[in-house]
Image (cartoon, rainbow, N blue to C red):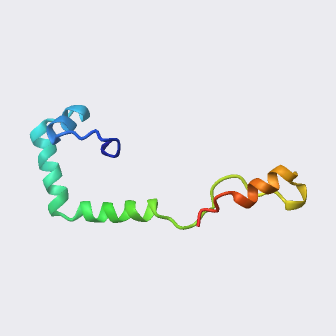
Amino acid sequence: MADKGIVLAPSQWASVLGMNPVTFERSLRESKYTGWIEQFSQMMLNVNTSSSNTGGRPSSDSSELTESAEGSRDTSYDGG
């Protein structure tokens, strides 16, 4: 939600999750001091920055393309 400009205080997040605010804040501190946040952040960075572009529909054989499709293929973004 923060990426959309919605930022909540820890006590508000606790309320959203149905947790006691004090318990939630203790959990946040524990995750910070045990290094869990750094490990999780690194794991998420690796997942979200994969350089392989294997998603999407497989490319069609060029001999099967119409003139219009060939023009689109030449100008499309290749992900790299």
- 41 to the left or right of 24: right
Which of the 4 quarters of the picture holds residue 20?
Answer: top left
Q: Residue at x 50, y 65 (%)?
A: 50
- 52 to the left or right of 46: right
Residue extending farthest to the left is 22
The percent position of residue 8, horizontal first and vertical second, equals 21, 39
Q: Is residue 56 above or below residue 21?
A: below
Q: For the image shown, how many numbered marks are present on the structure?
A: 0
Q: Is residue 79 above or below residue 14?
A: below
Q: Residue at x 75, y 53 (%)?
A: 72
Q: Residue at x 86, y 54 (%)?
A: 65
Foreground of the two, 62 or 38: 62
Residue extending farthest to the right is 63
User: In the picture, which quadrant includes the N terminus?
Assistant: top left
The percent position of residue 14, horizontal first and vertical second, equals 19, 37
The percent position of residue 53, horizontal first and vertical second, equals 60, 63
The percent position of residue 60, horizontal first and vertical second, equals 81, 56
User: In the picture, which quadrant includes the C terminus?
Assistant: bottom right
Which of the 4 quarters of the picture holds residue 44?
Answer: bottom left
